[in-house]
Structures are given as C-alpha cells and as structure tokens.
C-alpha cells in the first residue's frame, strides 16, 4: 500500500489522542486523578490536537478532499464512514468533559463514560477499514484490530504518564498500566508479524484468471508500460531483509527503549521521573511511525497478480 505520511500520521496520532482521552476519563472515574485545571488543560489540549491534526491529515490522502463530507452518507456499508461519524460525535462528550474539568473544575461521569465508549469505537472503526479488506491478506485477520486497540491504549498511557510526571509526583498505577500495555502490545504485534510471515499465499495468477485448470499460468505482458496508481497504492515492494531490519528498529524504539525508561521511572521521583517519562515518549514516537509504515508497506493487494506478482 501507499506509504503516504498523511495516513501514517493519522492512524498513529488519532490512536494516541483517543487513547489519552479514554485513560484520562477512566482513571478519573476510578478516583486516581485530581480535577486539576492545568492538568486537564494540558491533557485535553494534547488529545484534541492529536485527534484533530490526525483527522485533517487523513484528508490529504484523498484525491478530492473537498468531497470528504460525502463519506458520512455511507455509514451502512463503510467503516470509513462510521469512523468519520464517531469522530464528529466524540467531540461533544469529550468537549463537555473538558469544559467542565478546565473551567468549572467539575467532572461529569456520564460524559466520561461516553468519551471512553466513543474513543474505543473510533479506533475499532479505523482498524476495520483495513481488517475488512479480504483482498489484502496481511490485513484481513483479527490481529489488525487487536494491535490497533492495544497500541492506542499503550501510546495514550505513555502520554498520560508523561503529563502526570510534569504535574507533580507521577502515579505509579499509571506507570504500571503503561508497562502492562507495552508488554501485551508487543506480544500482539509479534503475533501479527508471525501471522503475516507464516500464512501461505492463497491466490496465484492462475486462480485470479481462472486459467489454473489448464496448467501453470504466467504473465506475458504487463497491463501498463509504466507505474500507475494501482501499483503505487497497492503494490509497494519491500525486500524481506529491509522489512526485518525495520521490524527490529520498531521493536527497539517503540518497545525496548520505552520499557527500560518506564521500569527505571518506578524507582525514582521528581525531575528524574519526568526525564524518564519523556524519554519513553520520545522513543515511542519514531518507533510507532516505523511500525505503522511497515503495516502499509508490507501489505499487498491481490490486484498485484496482474502486475507481475506470482502469488498473494
């Protein structure tokens, strides 16, 4: 698939933003977080910024961004449409929750629960845009949704952990949750990569053309003499050795380095705790961007069978 940075940024930033909103609501419902005006201002401001910038960047990937509003009408059949509707609706409870917290120093539990439900729903809809595509085997599996949800939880937890370290003593329960989210995220991502690597191709040129009953089919001539939109969007080729190297980079920056910083953070306080929390966040950002780039780059659409691929 196309490695457009707009989509990579959108899926990464919006997931982190909604993860932060959900955890901010959840921990406050549990009585762990104080209704502090500046904490609320910083947390909600960061979450809304990530979500809004992510949504805006996603329109840059469209051929006609000015027609994006038409996607809302296809909610019965399109996960993209459902995602857009949930995104718009989520601003209402989250916005009311933020206004009450920042300006009135009040906490509306009903708005908090709605924010959590809509945040999870948005990330789920985003994942299903890809998981529902049967023509792309690397995406058409349960691990896509699991990984999207867990990475949103993990990245949101890292953000909340960092913010709390700036506003006084960080909460150990948040740091522990962040470590737990990190561990289950890396397990899920590893299982996803294993699924991609070990699942045999189920389509060939012969099965795609219906000529396999006559013997082995092969492409005599490509449909086009130069690269076109389909090849750019749905047939990016990445060498296995490069993919393996980038996977290691993603594992190191998105998981190994943040884990080290978070574990050390449990044993220190004050400025040292804030520095370690920032180190975890600073490492996570490039790691997640590489992870998401690979998610698109390693996926291959079955249409590539008509452009030279032997099997998908």
Image (cartoon, helix red, strand yellow):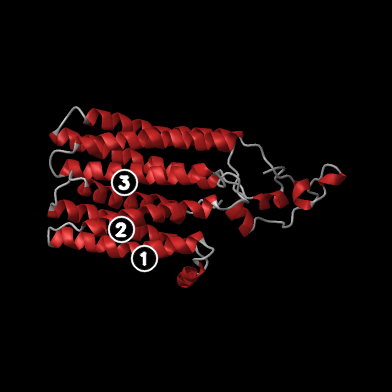
Q: Image quarter for residue 289? A: top left
Q: Secondary structure at mark 3?
A: helix
Measured in 3D between alpha carbons, the distance from the residue under mark 3 to the one under mark 2, in whole angstroms, is: 17 Å
Residue drawn where x is 46% and y is 62% of the image:
82
Give the percent coordinates (x, y) of residue 245.
50, 33
Q: Are marks 3 and 2 in contact (CB under 8 Å)?
A: no
Say which of 185 and 5 sits in front.
185
Classify 10 Å Cα crowding around label 2: few (below 14), some (14-19), many (20 and above).
Answer: some
Classify 10 Å Cα crowding around label 3: few (below 14), some (14-19), many (20 and above).
Answer: many
Which labelled disc corresponds to residue 156? 3
In terms of sequence position, does the residue under pointer 3 or pointer 1 come before the other? 1
Measured in 3D between alpha carbons, the distance from the residue under mark 3 to the one under mark 1, in whole angstroms, is: 20 Å
Which labelled disc corresponds to residue 229? none
Task: Pick out the residue farthest to the front.
Answer: 110
Say which of 160 and 309 sits in front.
160
Residue drawn where x is 34% and y is 49% of the image:
16
In terms of sequence position, does the residue under pointer 3 or pointer 2 come before the other? 2
Give the percent coordinates (x, y) of residue 74.
51, 68
Q: Disc 1 designates what residue? A: 88
Whether residue 265 is visible to the viewer of this picture, yes or no, is yes
Above or below: residue 197 compared with residue 94: above
Residue 5 horizontal side relative to residue 135, left or right: left
Can you say which quadrant of the picture contains the C terminus? top right
Q: Secondary structure at mark 1?
A: helix
Say which of 255 and 175 sits in front.
175
Q: Are marks 2 and 1 in contact (CB under 8 Å)?
A: no
Whether residue 56 is visible to the viewer of this picture, yes or no, is no
Measured in 3D between alpha carbons, the distance from the residue under mark 2 to the one under mark 1, in whole angstroms, is: 13 Å
Which labelled disc corresponds to residue 114? 2
């Amino acid at each position: 698939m196309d490695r457009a940075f707009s989509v990579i940024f959108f899926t990464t930033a919006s997931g982190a933003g909604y993860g932060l909103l959900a955890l901010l609501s959840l921990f406050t419902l549990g009585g762990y977080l104080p209704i502090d005006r500046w904490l609320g201002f910083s947390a909600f401001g960061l979450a809304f910024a990530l979500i809004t910038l992510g949504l805006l960047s996603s329109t840059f990937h469209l051929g006609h961004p000015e027609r994006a509003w038409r996607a809302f009408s296809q909610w019965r059949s399109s996960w993209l449409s459902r995602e857009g509707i949930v995104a718009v609706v989520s601003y209402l409870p989250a916005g009311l929750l933020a206004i009450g917290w920042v300006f009135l120093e009040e906490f509306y539990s009903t708005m908090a629960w709605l924010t959590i439900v809509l945040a999870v729903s948005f990330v789920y809809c985003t994942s299903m845009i890809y998981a529902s595509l049967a023509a792309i085997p690397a995406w058409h599996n349960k691990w896509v949704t699991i990984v999207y949800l867990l990475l949103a939880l993990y990245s949101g937890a890292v953000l909340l952990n960092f913010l709390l370290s700036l506003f006084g003593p960080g909460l150990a329960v948040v740091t522990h949750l962040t470590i737990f989210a990190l561990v289950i995220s890396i397990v899920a991502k590893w299982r996803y990569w294993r699924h991609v690597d070990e699942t045999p191709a189920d389509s060939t040129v012969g099965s795609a053309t219906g000529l396999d009953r006559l013997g082995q089919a092969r492409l005599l001539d490509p449909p086009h003499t130069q690269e076109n939109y389909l090849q750019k969007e749905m047939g990016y080729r990445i060498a296995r050795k490069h993919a393996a190297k980038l996977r290691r980079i993603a594992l190191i920056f998105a998981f190994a380095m943040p884990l080290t910083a978070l574990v050390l953070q449990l044993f220190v306080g004050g400025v040292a705790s804030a520095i370690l929390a920032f180190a975890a966040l600073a490492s996570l950002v490039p790691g997640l961007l590489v992870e998401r780039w690979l998610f698109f780059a390693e996926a291959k659409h079955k249409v590539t069978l008509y452009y030279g691929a032997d099997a998908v």
